[in-house]
Amino acid sequence: MALRSPDVHVAAITVVAGNVPLEQATRNALYTAELCGSSVPVYAGEARPLMREHQSAQWFHGRDGLGDQGYPPPVRKPESKHAVDAIVDVISANPGIVVVTLGPLTNVALALARSPDLVKNVSRCVVMGGNPCTEGNVTPAAEFNMWVDPEAARMVLHSGLPIELVGWHLCRGEANLLAPDIEHVLSLGTELARFAIDCNRIAMEANRKQTGEVGIALPDPTAMAIALDPSICTNASQHYVDVETDSELTRGMTVVDRLGVAGDERNRAVWQPLLDRGPNGTVCWEIDIPRWKSLLYRSLV
């Protein structure tokens, strides 16, 4: 979507181990960029979380992360520079840059640890991750990206970046690509349109088994749509957001005080030191669904 947007310059794509291992994820990024006719540099980064073993989502997206459709290998190779170095260099060279994260936050956390002042150059940091005040999609308590590397997520949330949290809940229900939407996309007749549907064939079935919803849930494109057009988020509010790192039961849970109860007398002993820091993120609660789908369709023509 970003690569097909005529008024957007994508400075870099950095890859982290997420839905699939790093090598496969890098291959997928290169293949997708080539499909879009883009020569954007692609940088491979961390192959595992900061403190944990990597856990993939191949059960949801297929062994190759693209629905096991047998796509050919990309022509290009990734850049030799490590993704963490690329993040530092690209943000340093582009004051006001918009950062969009679509996977675990390992690379970003390491870049910020190396160069904390990077936050001053970032105008927006749109994070696809979390499940504020909703059920999880990898455990009952957590969304996948936050669960894979919760320590990195916490570091990024505490960094001072201007975070806009786009949770998993925003791609559910009517925001799924439903049967008429899928039919419309395929009717566009382009290679990109077919790719958008076919690479999600396994994910569509996994989505049906997990949620009972018959459609394609697209959390990453939903986040990118909000990055490209902030007005797509129709209901947002600022909060202190944190991520659970210690409990195996609620590992990766994004804790958001939506109702403002953290400052109540019964909660102050735990929450007041955190609330004193002030809000550290803007949470998007609702989106303009027709507007987000329209933006997606335009990128596939």
Image: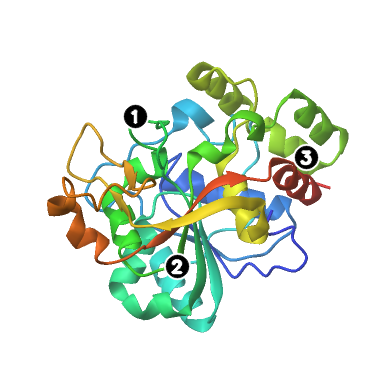
Q: What mark, if any, has residue 158 been given in the picture?
A: none
Mark 1 nearby-residue class (10 Å; few <14, some 14–19, many ≥20): some
Q: CA distance from mark 2 to mark 1?
A: 27 Å
Question: Which amino acid, mark 1?
Answer: Thr
Mark 2 nearby-residue class (10 Å; few <14, some 14–19, many ≥20): some
Above or below residue 155? Residue 294 is above
Which comes before the other along the chain, label 3 or label 1?
1
Quarter of the view holding residue 289: top right
Q: Find disc 2 in the rendering and name its residue.
A: 162
Q: Are marks 2 and 1 in contact (CB under 8 Å)?
A: no
Q: Find disc 1 in the rendering and name its residue.
A: 139
| Left or right side of 82 for 195 | right
- Name the residue located 18 percent from the left edge and 61 percent from the top edge: 273
Kind of element beneath mark 1: loop
Question: Which amino acid, mark 2?
Answer: Pro
Q: Position of residue 155 (x, y in %)?
A: 29, 60
Q: Position of residue 135 (x, y in %)?
A: 40, 31
